[in-house]
């Protein structure tokens, strides 16, 4: 989606322009876009849509246009682009990323052009900016006074850009091109003296002095005839410079340009006139400590007495890692890449199994063909097959944009907007973009550059056939190395002499490594550090390992064998930790989990992890967060298979203990399971959580790990651990109830039933039933929840029974069974009071009050809500307190007591807003908006609803 103001006002989509309709609707859109992301009052819009006295129904006309425009945007899926047309009191605001508005992109490119140190880059940026113009600004709209002023301002900015482009052509010595550009604009704007002055200088420096002088006299006569004035200082100074025969400081002879990188150049003597007219201001690079986006310091050309030191053009951007060392073979594949890179905006796709050398091939080709990409080379590891997870698209795009010179504060916040800016900036460049380790086609598509001269090189373990179909990607499959190439790779690391001394053993090593470059490199690294070892002895070692590593794929045999040689030189504590890491069921590990696996403490575990990292057996992807390569994990798992169950129990019990601490911090007093499993092994240390936010972050970050741990527990027959690990995530389940928790809870239910644990089954059914209710699956939820109270009674769990009755009541009320729902809630209140559990009693009273309100019995609803409030909820219960206050307010409204109702609803909304509980704020404010015309309630409601809709 793109909004156009630089030409006919339009909204472009993939399916074509939106049918905006009459000119006044285009005027409305233009006025909103000119103040994008800022509220525009109805009065301001009225001035934009009517040139004279507006009609009496002007507000209604504007509302109609807004409604139609909003419908058009919604139909074009504007929300996916971050676009929204919202009402804020007596104003409207069009929220949209700046990169979707051509006028904003024009200003952005103009700013970037002024910050370039190379005139060539400045020219590219300025031409890109001017290419956005498709006619006079705001065409097709009815131009009231504000829009006429805006159109004039945009046109002035365009003309200033044309003049700057012409001056920059001059610094490159391309005066004929500058003259051609200015001639067309001067014909359209014959009275603009600055254009005429620039054209005169361009003609003069292009060797066309007579034309330059003729241009002056024609302009002088036109000014006198049309305006009755004489030429101003710019025209007069340019005329004087030409008469003196002074070339001015903008002249850039080829020889002078060639000296830029070798030493200072002394410019010709420049008169004041030439400094005023012909000089191109140069933006000084920001000094350390300057804020991003600060205006550049303008440096005027030096006088003839002071030689000017011209900085060399900045080097092309280069994010490539170093070239792989000892690279051997792959001649056919390198040639195939060269062929694939030919053509228009090619996408080259290197595919093959793990460890086969896809990244090495891509980097080797990129470094060998540096000259093909004068504008630079970008690189991103997409981590498509890493347990650490893929980087967010916006993070990759941000790195690319920063490398291309975009100031940090100018990088868009949304991935689609950042991708649009990336395509725009690469549209006229010759760049190489290397996207390493991609998992799927969609990820790659969002990172493709926009220029037809750009080459994208992708590596992946998948074939990415979708990318071949959609973007004509040209695949280059990669297989294992031939024996000769493998032997050459060993020689590249070990030295020719050592390999030639044992040629048969070297070939045998290459064969035992299966032609896998990763295995060959690790093996060569071990040999390089031990010159006393013979290749034959190492080949015998590898041969002995083949049977032991039969569970690995054929291509992985060499990796595992080489890893054994690395591990055997580690100290015993590091080997012990490494072996236990192989039994970790999750994707990543921290020192606490590593300690639980190894039966040590987090300090010792962290030290062992550091040592393993030094041996390249684990990688730290974030502070305190470690991962193993998938093949390394397989090898580690085989080191001590007898310890598998002990290690698994240790990490499961670590997960239970940490999840208990997180749940207790996030929701104190609301823990659903209290009894630890039989044989529970308490970890040496459990992570502390400072507050609810930290606990919830841990539960969110560990969700996948905990799910994998629960599945591993179920597979190992440890059902009592499996359902606990899942159920202990209930604060996150409640907070993100519609986040696909059903499969995990069904695993917990299966585990509880396999263990014949009525307590566990009841608790899981209660939570699963509530999740199904929130997912709109009320009938399924009711069928499950029917059994939960009975199971809780059998297990002697009165609080579990009360919670089950509450959730059953909620779903029955939704199904229209209000009497049964009320009875269940009343029973839950009794059970909670008997157990003296205020948390559960308050929850039951809250739902009972809501049901009484639904049954049109506001007096009873008010009594139940007040009773719940009198229980004295703690500060952690701010959300529930807000809900109870809202019920009280609605009850007063139902009783005809509007003042009290509005007061209590306003209080409920404010407490919810203060607590960050947007859902509660929205509920209370919805009632207030329906009840009163106070505009502040509508504004607050829209803000809370927006926060709720955009919450992560």
Image: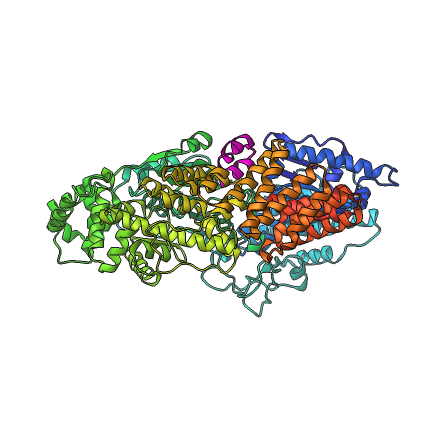
Q: Looking at the image, which is closer to me, 581 or 277?
A: 581
Residue at 16% x, 45% y: name it: 545
- Count of all numbered marks drawn on residues in the image: 0
Residue 546 left/right relative to 170: left
Picture coordinates of residue 397, whole percent (x, y): 50, 47
Query: Is residue 346 something one can see in this rendering?
Result: no
**Whether residue 246 is situated above or below residue 883 in the rendered picture:** below
Residue that extends furthest to the front in the rendered view of this protein: 834
Q: In the picture, residue 84 is in which quadrant?
A: top right
Residue that extends furthest to the bottom in the rendered view of this protein: 305
Per the rendered image, the range of residues in magenta is 767-788
Q: Looking at the image, which is closer to me, 734 or 190?
A: 734
Q: Looking at the image, which is closer to me, 157 or 464?
A: 464
Picture coordinates of residue 683, whole percent (x, y): 35, 57
Magenta stretch prevailing secondary structure: helix
Picture coordinates of residue 249, whole percent (x, y): 60, 59
The answer to whether residue 709 is magenta is no
The answer to whether residue 770 is magenta is yes
Residue at 11% x, 45% y: name it: 504
Q: Looking at the image, which is closer to me, 493 or 777?
A: 777
Quadrant for the N terminus in the image:
top right
Residue 404 left/right relative to 651: right
Residue 916 left/right relative to 580: right
Query: Is residue 818 something one can see in this rendering?
Result: yes
Residue at 52% x, 65% y: name it: 309
Applied colour scheme:
rainbow
Picture coordinates of residue 154, whole percent (x, y): 71, 46
């Amino acid at each position: 989606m793109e909004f156009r103001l630089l030409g006919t006002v339009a909204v472009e989509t993939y399916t074509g322009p939106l049918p905006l309709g009459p000119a006044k609707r285009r005027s409305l859109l233009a006025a909103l876009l000119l103040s994008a992301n800022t509220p525009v009052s109805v009065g301001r819009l009225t001035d934009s849509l009517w040139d004279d006295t507006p009609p009496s129904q002007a507000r209604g006309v504007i509302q109609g246009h807004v409604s139609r425009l909003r419908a058009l945007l919604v139909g074009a899926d504007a929300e996916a682009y971050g676009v929204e047309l919202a009402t804020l009191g007596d104003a409207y605001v069009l929220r949209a990323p700046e990169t979707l508005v051509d006028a904003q992109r024009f200003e952005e490119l103009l700013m970037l052009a002024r910050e370039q140190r190379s005139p060539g880059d400045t020219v590219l940026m300025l031409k890109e900016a001017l290419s956005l113009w498709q006619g006079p600004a705001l065409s097709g709209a009815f131009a009231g006074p504000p829009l006429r002023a805006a159109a004039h301002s945009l046109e002035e900015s365009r003309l200033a850009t044309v003049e700057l482009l012409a001056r920059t052509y001059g610094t490159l010595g391309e005066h004929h091109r500058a003259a051609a550009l200015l001639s067309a604009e001067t014909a359209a704007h014959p009275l603009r003296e600055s254009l005429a002055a620039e054209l005169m200088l361009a003609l003069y420096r292009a060797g066309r002095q007579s034309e330059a002088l003729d241009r002056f006299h024609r302009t002088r006569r036109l000014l006198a005839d049309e305006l009755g004035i004489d030429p101003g200082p710019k025209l007069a100074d340019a005329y004087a410079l030409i008469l003196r025969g002074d070339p001015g400081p903008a002249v850039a002879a080829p020889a002078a340009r060639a000296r830029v990188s070798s030493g200072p150049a002394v410019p010709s003597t420049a008169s004041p006139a030439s400094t005023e007219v012909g000089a191109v201001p140069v933006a000084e690079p920001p000094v350390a400590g300057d804020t991003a986006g600060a205006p550049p310091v303008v440096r005027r050309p030096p006088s003839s007495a002071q030689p000017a030191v011209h900085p060399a053009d900045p080097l092309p951007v280069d994010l490539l890692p170093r070239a792989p060392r000892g690279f051997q073979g792959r001649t056919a594949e390198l040639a195939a890449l060269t062929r694939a890179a030919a053509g228009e905006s090619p996408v080259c796709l290197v595919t093959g199994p793990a460890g086969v050398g896809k990244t090495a091939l891509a980097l080797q080709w990129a470094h060998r063909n540096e000259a093909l990409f004068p504008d630079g080379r970008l690189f991103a590891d997409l981590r498509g097959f890493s347990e650490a997870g893929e980087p967010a698209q916006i993070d990759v795009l941000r790195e690319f944009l920063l490398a291309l010179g975009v100031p940090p504060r100018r990088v868009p916040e949304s991935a689609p907007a950042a991708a649009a800016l990336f395509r725009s900036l690469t549209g006229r460049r010759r760049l190489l973009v290397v996207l390493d380790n991609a998992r799927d086609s969609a990820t790659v598509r969002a990172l493709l550059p926009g220029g037809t001269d750009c080459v994208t090189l992708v590596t992946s373990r998948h074939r990415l056939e979708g990318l071949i179909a959609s973007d004509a990607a040209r695949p280059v499959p990669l297989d294992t190395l031939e024996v000769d190439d493998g032997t050459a790779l060993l020689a590249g690391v070990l030295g020719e002499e050592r390999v030639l001394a044992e040629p048969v053993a070297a070939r045998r090593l290459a064969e035992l490594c299966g032609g896998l470059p990763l295995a060959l490199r690790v093996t060569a690294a071990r040999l390089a550090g031990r010159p006393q070892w013979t290749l034959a002895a190492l080949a015998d070692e590898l041969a002995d390992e083949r049977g032991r590593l039969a569970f690995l794929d054929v291509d992985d045999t060499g990796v595992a064998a080489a890893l054994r040689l690395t591990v055997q030189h580690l100290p015993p504590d590091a080997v012990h930790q490494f072996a236990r890491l192989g039994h970790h069921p999750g994707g990543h590990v921290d020192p606490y989990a590593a300690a639980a696996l190894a039966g040590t403490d987090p300090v010792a575990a962290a030290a062992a992890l550091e040592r393993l990292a030094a041996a390249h057996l684990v990688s730290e992807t974030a502070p305190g967060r470690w991962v193993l390569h998938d093949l390394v994990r397989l090898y580690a798992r085989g080191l001590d298979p007898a310890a598998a169950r002990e290690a698994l129990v240790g990490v499961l019990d670590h997960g239970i203990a940490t999840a208990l601490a997180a749940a207790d911090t996030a929701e104190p007093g609301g823990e659903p399971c209290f009894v630890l499993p039989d044989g529970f092994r308490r970890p040496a240390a459990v992570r502390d959580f400072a507050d609810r936010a930290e606990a919830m972050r841990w539960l969110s970050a560990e969700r996948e790990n905990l799910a994998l741990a629960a599945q591993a527990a179920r597979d190992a027959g440890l059902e009592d651990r499996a359902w606990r690990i899942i159920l202990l995530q209930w604060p996150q389940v409640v907070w993100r109830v519609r986040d696909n928790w059903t499969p995990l809870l069904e695993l917990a239910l299966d585990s509880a039933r396999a263990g014949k644990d009525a307590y566990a089954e009841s608790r899981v059914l209660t939570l699963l039933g509530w999740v199904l209710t929130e997912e709109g699956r009320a009938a399924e939820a009711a069928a499950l929840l029917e059994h939960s109270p009975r199971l809780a009674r059998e297990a002697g769990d009165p609080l579990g029974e009360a919670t089950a009755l509450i959730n059953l009541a909620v779903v029955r009320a939704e199904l229209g069974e209000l009497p049964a729902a009320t009875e269940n809630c009343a029973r839950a209140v009794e059970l909670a009071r008997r157990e003296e559990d205020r948390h559960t009693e308050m929850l039951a009273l809250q739902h009972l009050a809501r049901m009484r309100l639904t049954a049109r019995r506001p007096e009873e609803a008010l009594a139940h809500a007040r009773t719940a409030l009198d229980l004295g909820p703690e500060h952690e219960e701010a959300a529930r307190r807000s809900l109870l206050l809202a019920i009280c307010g609605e009850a007063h409204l139902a009783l005809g007591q509007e003042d009290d109702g509005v007061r209590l609803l306003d209080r409920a909304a404010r407490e919810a807003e203060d607590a960050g509980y947007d859902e509660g704020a929205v509920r209370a404010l919805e009632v207030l908006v329906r009840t009163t015309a106070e505009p502040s309630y509508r504004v607050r409601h829209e803000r809370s609803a927006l926060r709720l809709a955009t919450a992560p």
